[in-house]
Every structure is written in structure tokens, then in C-alpha cells.
């Protein structure tokens, strides 16, 4: 547990049990009396062909814990309720979940259900997201709040207006000034009074990757001059009472509460200015998302994968800042709305995948084998050789640069042929690679091949170099003896995991044992990864199980849903192919070519093909992995 800092990033939901397996406490460790759930037992049950309705799901497997989601939602609401109560704040907290973080049907429906007692709302950023939010909230009994963000066309605005007639509280948030004319026009046409908000471009800027759209020059929102124009226009049209909400979003993973308080203070001043300008129906300050989570468990505000605060600190900083400004300006306290996404859904799922082989590359060995090559002069050979043996890799690099210069001169003079020059280039590249690898990793690193796709399941790892906690989900009572990196199934050199939460390029892993499975888990990936993930090499999403805590079931859990991942046919269909037509074409060919074949019949081939279309794109790994190969 210490090695992977599981207590740092995993508390209160993930820990290690006495069997050395990852254990899940879906209600948080604070809920006493419940049995911890052994993650390995869930994997065994989900993959067992005699369990889960005989599905025998294939890995990779997404294990969802609705109880964790419920706990996150209640903890966020509780943190704000507490901050509001402690400070005597004069209004309430209203959460909305930005569906873009994870649009999975069960997740959105769960959030609406679990949040119904405190009227949790939804945020949409596009037309399909709005349709999703509208229909989900219609299932709830109370009037649901839908914050309509994102760029809008007439159809988006019409949908948001019509939703008001369905007793949904849609607030159209201007992302651009031009949207106002469309809202005015369509609301007159449909005779529906709109509820309007706008997104302000704050001057408070959050640095780093996640803040790149914030600040005055940010991609979204209205500048101060545009805000003034919008207010004046609404005033002239007698529609200033439609202005209800001020929104801002300074970026995801806000690193510290001081930056947060800065942004909220600036926004609260804008809010008070709007009231001063006559927008008397203003009632909501929407602070956007940005509530961070601690991927590394280091509780540090200096890194993009950690934050130096918890839910309580976050809520306190927001409530305090709004209250202070409003009290100074004698403005009634607004409802505080937040659009936290990452903080709500990150913890609720774990992706489990399997390593199926390990290959060790010994860099020192690789370097020394390079030295016998024929194009080196005697002195170059002995210098390079001696430096490599002493482990002086910088010296090796200097020698090869010198040698390359010499060879290029000889080539220009006509005394060195093209094949020789190509050989020298190759040699130099190999020495350079070996030297740089040797500098960062003095020990050999084992490449573990894993049965998943980084592009499909951890796209942020590839796209924005984000790290996630990854660790074996069992054997945690055994000291891992290997330094490993993970290579996925795609034929792409970027399909690898070689950055980990401890800042290192390798992870402590166990030797794979012949005949035994080796399962790894990727944690805190519940936000953004699923919608961003692509179909590179036509690997689709994982199988999914929903697991609820149940003290009446064996091992303390019940699998409430089991959904196989997309088949080969499904992923082909996603790229506009027609699996049935493809199979028909292959069937014709099989009958044509196998008519005379008595050993392999056309029927057998077609049966096999049909099975492949219906089967997983991932490897179906035999229970005995091949033993590690040393290169
Ligand atoms: N609201 C808006 C407008 C956003 O752009 C985002 C994400 O970038 C969010 C909410 C959710 O942010 P987070 O997941 O950091 O809470």
C-alpha cells in the first residue's frame, strides 16, 4: 500500500486488505459496519462463465460502484451545507453535474436519483447533452435545474426554451455575445420568457494545462465590455429581469484555495455590479467546475496531478469569498452553484486489465553489443567501449557525435558509401537511445504487455500526459521485484504507460507466474476518459459491471448489471461498416473456395467468422501466460 501511496489518493474508498488485494469501501471508510469489498473477487465473479447470468465477461473490465458516486455527491453537498451553516450564509448550495465528464446513462441517472433530495441539477454543453439532461431530469419529481453552457445555435436555444414549458428550469448561459440576439428572437417567437445567464471571462487565471482557456484571452465567455453591452440591451428591451445567473470557470484541477478565492472574489464583484446596474433578479453565482482531486495522493498544490485541499476547504473558500464581497456591497447572498464533474465521478469506477507477458530489455547489454561494429576506427572503438563500460554515457554521446562528423566529411569527399553512412547513422541512434535510457534508468525495465488500449481507456495519459494511479490489484503482500512499464495492444508506440504518479517512468511490479493471472487496476479514471476514448485499432470500450455493497450477499457485494464490451462487429459498425454484409461476402467466398475441401468445410469457416464478429476485439488470454522472455 505504501509503495503505491494508495492511502494518499485512495482514501476513503480504496485500501489493501489482509489478503494483499485492493479492497473497496464504497461508502467511504467512515461508514462503519460494512464489509470491505475485495476487488479481485469482483473480477473473478464477472469473468466466471457460471456467474453474472453466464456472461463470463472479458477483460478489460470497468467496475462501477454507484455507492461511491452517492458518497461523493453527498460529501460535496454536505461540505457546502456545512460551510453555509457555519458562516450563517444567507442562501443555499445548488450543485449541477456537467454531463460531459461522463455521459454514461447509469451514471447520469444515478446522479439525478441520489441527488434528488437536494435537487442536484445537470449542466449541458451541446444539443445531445441538453436532450440527455432534459429527459433525465424529467424522470425526477422536482423542477430540475439545467445549466445550458457551450456554443449555441437556434436549435439549442429553442430546446432550452421549450424545456421551460416542461417545468424544467433551463438557464441559457451566454458563451458569446451574439447568442443574445438569438435568445431574444426565439423567446419572442415561442412566447417563452427565458432565464438567462452569462459566462464571464475572469481576469484571474489558473496557470498550467487545465487553465489554458481561462483569463481575459480565454476561449470562452464575455469580456467586461460585452457584459456591459448585454445588460444595457436587456434593459432597453425590458428583459433585465431575465438575467438570473453569473457563471465563470477558471479551469479544471484548480490547484489551491487561494487561487479559487481570488477567482470567486472577482466574480462576486461582477455579481454585485450587475445588481447595482439594475439586474435585480440575479440570484445565482455559478462557480463552474475545477474542484480538483488528488491523483498522486501528495496533497500538493504545485503539481497538475494533485491539489492541496479537500472538499471542506473548497466549499469554505467559496462561501467565505462570496459572503465577504456581498456583505461589503450590501447585496443579498446568491445561491452558490458549482459544476463539479471530476470530483464527483472520478472515484466511482476502476478499470481492471490483465498483463499477459513481460519482456526485459537490458540497456547495458544493448549498449555493449553496439561497440563491435565495423565502421569505428580503432581509437573511436576503444574510447567508446571504455566510456560505455565505465557507464559514462555523456562521454559516449560526445564520441559518437565526433565520429558522425568524421564520417559525414568522408561521405562528402566520396570515400564513404551510402550503405556505410546509413549504418553509421543507425549506430549513432542506437547509442543515443541506449545512453539516454541508461541515464534515466540504471536498472533494466520490463515491458509488460497489457490487454487494453491506452487510446480507448486512458486517453488523457496519451493526450495530455496526465498520470493516474495504476497498480496490481492483488499480490500486494508480496514485495514486487521488477521495474515495469506497460505496453498496450495497439500497434502504436504511444500506446504505453511509462509515467506514474510517483513521477517515475517505471512501476514496481511482480514477476508474472506461469499459470496465474496478473491483474492491474487504473483508478480515479471515472471523469472524461470514457467519452474522450477513441477506437484506435478498433479496440472498443471495456466490459462493465455495476457493483453494490450488500451485506446479505457472499463477499459483501452484489453485481447489479453486467454488460459485455463492444464486439468486433460493434466497433466495425461504429466506423460505418456493415458486419452482416461483410459476413455475407465472406460466406460467398467460403462456399466458392471450400466446396471441395473435406478437411475444412465452408460451414465451419463461416461459423468461426460469425463468432469472431460477435467476440471481443481484445485478446482472449489463456489462463497460463507465457513465461517472461529475456532479450
Ligand atoms: N463547467 C465547465 C464550463 C467546464 O468547462 C468544465 C470542465 O472543464 C466543468 C464544468 C467541469 O470541470 P471539473 O471536471 O474540473 O469539475
Image (spheres, rainbow, N blue to C red):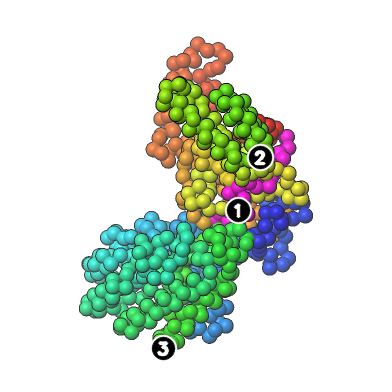
Q: Which corner quadrant of the image does residue 282 belong to?
A: bottom left
The residue beneath circle 1 is 503
Q: Residues within 10 Å of mark 1 (few under 14, many from 20)?
A: few
Front-most of residues 299 and 62: 299
Residue at x 47% of width, y 19% of height: 590
Quarter of the image that includes the N terminus: bottom right
**Disc with the residue nearer the chain's start (2 vs 3):** 3
- Comparing labels 3 and 1, the label whose residue is closer to the camera: 1
What label sits on residue 330 in the rendered view? 3
Q: Is residue 258 left or right of residue 557?
A: left
In the image, residue 76 above or below residue 413:
below
Q: Which corner quadrant of the image does residue 197 belong to?
A: bottom left
Do the residues bearing badges 2 and 3 touch, measured as CB atoms within 8 Å? Answer: no
Quarter of the image that includes the C terminus: top right
Which residue sits furthest top? 596
**Disc with the residue nearer the chain's start (1 vs 2):** 2
Q: Judging from the image, what secondary structure is the residue with disc 3 in?
A: loop
Does residue 514 show up magenta in the picture? yes
Do the residues bearing badges 1 and 2 touch, measured as CB atoms within 8 Å? Answer: no
Q: Judging from the image, what secondary structure is the residue with disc 1 in?
A: loop
Does residue 280 show up magenta in the picture? no
The residue beneath circle 2 is 391
Do the residues bearing badges 3 and 1 touch, measured as CB atoms within 8 Å? Answer: no
In magenta, the rendered stretch is 499-526
Mark-to-mark CA distance, 1 and 2: 24 Å
Amino acid at each position: 500500500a505504501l509503495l503505491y501511496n494508495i492511502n494518499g489518493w485512495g482514501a476513503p474508498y480504496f485500501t489493501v486488505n489482509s489478503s494483499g488485494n485492493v479492497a473497496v469501501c464504497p461508502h467511504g471508510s467512515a461508514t462503519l459496519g460494512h464489509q470491505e469489498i475485495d476487488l479481485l473477487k469482483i473480477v473473478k465473479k464477472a469473468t466466471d462463465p457460471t456467474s453474472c447470468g453466464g456472461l463470463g465477461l472479458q477483460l478489460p473490465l470497468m467496475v462501477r460502484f454507484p455507492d461511491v458516486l452517492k458518497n461523493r455527491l453527498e460529501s460535496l453537498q454536505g461540505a457546502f451545507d456545512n460551510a453555509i451553516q457555519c458562516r450563517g450564509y444567507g442562501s443555499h448550495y445548488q450543485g449541477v453535474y456537467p454531463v460531459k465528464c461522463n455521459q454514461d446513462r447509469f451514471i447520469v441517472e444515478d446522479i439525478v436519483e441520489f441527488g434528488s433530495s437536494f435537487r442536484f441539477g445537470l449542466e449541458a454543453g451541446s444539443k445531445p447533452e441538453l436532450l440527455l439532461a432534459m429527459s433525465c431530469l424529467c424522470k425526477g419529481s422536482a423542477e430540475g435545474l439545467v445549466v445550458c453552457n457551450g456554443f449555441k445555435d437556434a436549435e439549442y436555444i429553442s430546446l432550452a426554451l421549450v424545456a421551460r414549458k416542461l417545468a424544467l428550469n433551463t438557464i441559457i448561459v451566454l458563451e458569446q455575445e451574439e447568442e443574445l440576439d438569438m435568445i431574444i428572437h426565439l423567446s419572442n417567437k415561442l412566447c417563452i420568457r427565458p432565464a438567462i445567464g452569462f459566462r464571464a471571462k475572469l481576469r484571474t487565471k489558473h496557470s498550467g494545462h487545465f487553465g489554458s482557456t481561462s483569463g481575459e484571452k480565454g476561449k470562452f465567455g464575455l469580456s467586461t465590455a460585452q457584459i456591459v453591452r448585454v445588460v444595457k440591451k436587456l434593459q432597453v428591451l425590458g428583459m433585465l429581469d431575465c438575467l438570473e445567473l453569473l457563471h465563470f470557470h477558471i479551469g479544471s484541477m484548480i490547484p489551491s484555495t487561494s487561487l479559487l478565492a481570488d477567482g470567486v472574489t472577482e466574480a462576486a464583484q461582477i455579481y454585485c455590479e450587475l445588481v447595482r446596474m439594475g439586474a435585480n433578479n440575479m440570484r445565482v453565482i455559478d462557480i463552474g467546475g475545477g474542484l480538483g482531486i488528488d491523483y498522486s495522493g501528495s496533497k500538493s498544490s504545485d503539481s497538475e496531478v494533485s491539489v492541496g485541499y479537500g472538499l471542506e476547504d473548497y466549499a469554505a473558500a467559496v462561501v467565505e469569498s462570496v459572503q465577504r464581497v456581498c456583505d461589503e456591497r450590501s447585496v443579498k447572498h446568491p445561491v452558490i452553484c458549482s459544476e463539479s464533474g471530476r470530483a464527483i465521478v472520478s472515484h466511482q469506477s476502476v478499470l481492471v486489465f490483465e498483463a499477459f507477458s513481460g519482456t526485459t530489455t537490458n540497456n547495458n547489454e544493448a549498449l555493449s553489443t553496439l561497440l563491435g561494429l565495423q565502421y569505428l576506427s580503432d581509437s573511436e572503438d576503444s574510447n567508446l567501449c571504455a566510456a560505455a563500460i565505465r557507464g559514462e554515457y555523456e562521454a559516449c554521446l560526445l564520441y559518437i557525435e565526433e565520429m558522425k562528423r568524421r564520417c559525414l566529411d568522408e561521405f562528402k569527399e566520396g570515400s564513404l558509401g551510402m550503405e556505410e553512412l546509413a549504418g553509421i547513422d543507425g549506430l549513432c541512434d542506437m547509442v543515443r537511445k541506449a545512453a539516454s535510457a541508461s541515464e534515466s534508468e540504471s536498472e533494466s525495465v520490463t515491458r509488460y504487455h497489457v490487454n487494453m488500449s491506452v487510446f480507448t481507456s486512458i486517453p488523457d495519459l496519451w493526450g495530455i500526459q496526465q498520470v493516474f494511479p495504476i497498480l496490481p490489484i492483488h499480490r500486494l503482500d508480496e514485495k514486487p521485484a521488477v521495474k515495469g512499464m506497460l505496453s498496450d495492444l495497439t500497434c502504436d508506440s504511444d500506446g504505453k504507460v511509462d509515467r506514474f504518479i510517483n513521477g517515475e517512468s517505471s512501476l514496481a511490479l511482480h514477476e508474472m507466474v506461469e499459470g496465474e493471472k496478473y491483474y492491474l487496476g487504473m483508478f480515479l479514471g471515472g471523469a472524461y476518459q470514457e467519452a474522450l476514448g477513441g477506437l484506435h485499432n478498433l479496440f472498443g470500450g471495456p466490459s462493465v459491471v455495476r457493483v453494490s455493497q450488500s451485506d446479505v450477499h457472499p463477499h459483501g457485494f452484489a453485481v447489479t448489471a453486467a454488460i459485455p464490451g463492444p464486439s468486433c462487429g460493434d466497433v466495425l459498425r461504429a466506423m460505418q461498416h456493415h458486419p452482416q454484409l461483410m459476413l455475407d461476402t465472406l460466406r460467398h467466398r467460403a462456399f466458392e473456395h471450400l466446396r471441395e475441401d473435406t478437411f475444412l468445410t465452408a460451414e465451419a469457416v463461416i461459423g468461426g467468422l460469425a463468432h469472431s464478429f460477435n467476440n471481443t476485439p481484445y485478446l482472449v488470454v489463456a489462463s497460463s501466460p507465457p513465461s517472461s522472455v529475456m532479450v
